[in-house]
Amino acid sequence: MEVLDSKQVSAQPFKRNATYADLATLPEHWTGQLIDGDLWAFARPAPAHAHATARLYRALGPEEADRETGWIIMSEVEIWFGKHLLVPDLAGWRRPRCPNLEEQTQTVTPDWVCEGLSPSTARLDRGRKREIYAEHNVGHLWFADPANKTIEVLVLDRGRYEIHQVAGGAERAQLAPFATQLDLAQLWSL
């Protein structure tokens, strides 16, 4: 099997005119997404990135406690946005809009998405994926940047994302759309 270079694939699709079946051709440790008919492939996140995302997932646990109006939050779930198949680092749905958890691939647009930025994915996350999230009315989009120890909170307003809040370092912050106070220092520490 071909050895993939994460810097190379971050600048161009892995395969043009791809289908869902092409995801099965990727090495085990790679994640694939279908964007504009092309397969984009990336190595699994570096440990610092994965650690920060996992800690954020755990920190948002209280948001799932209310079984009627709380949230369902999932990590690295495949989601169809029309013809695009994206795999955000974290995605959340308000419980009244809960997707079918028995399905491998979701079709209900999330209310919130968090993309953990890395050198190989930041351009696509901030570019085309952001556009797709806006086109499909994802109300809140976060960019978690472990290298800079920041979270940018974007809110959809009339079809465009506006920066609502930026928090980082050792701040304690409540970030929209959630009520939970996050200790950001805990996200970045190893």
Image (spheres, helix red, strand yellow):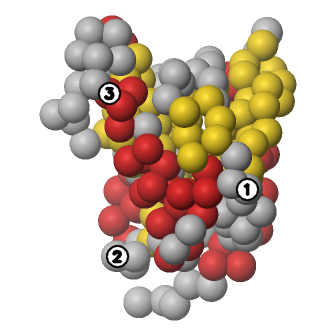
| Foreground label between 1 and 2 | 1
Q: Which mark is residue 64?
A: 3
Say whether marks 1 and 2 touch (CB < 8 Å): no
- Disc 3 and disc 1: Cα gap in Å? 25 Å
**Quadrant of the image occupied by residue 122:** bottom right
Q: Please state which of residues 153 and 75 is positioned toward the viewer in this rendering.
A: 153
Residue 57 appears anywhere in the view? yes
Work out whether 44 lies above or below 109.
Answer: below
Label 1 crowd bin: few (<14), some (14–19), many (20+), radius 10 Å: some
Label 3 crowd bin: few (<14), some (14–19), many (20+), radius 10 Å: some
Q: Is residue 162 left or right of residue 109?
A: right
Q: Which mark is residue 28?
A: 2
Please tell me which of labels 2 and 3 falls first in the chain: 2
Instruction: Name the image quarter holding the N terminus.
Output: bottom left
Whole-percent x, y for residue 17 in the image: 57, 54
| Foreground label between 2 and 3 | 3
Amino acid beneath label 1:
Gly
Whole-percent x, y for residue 140 in the image: 63, 26
Residue with the mark numbered 1: 169
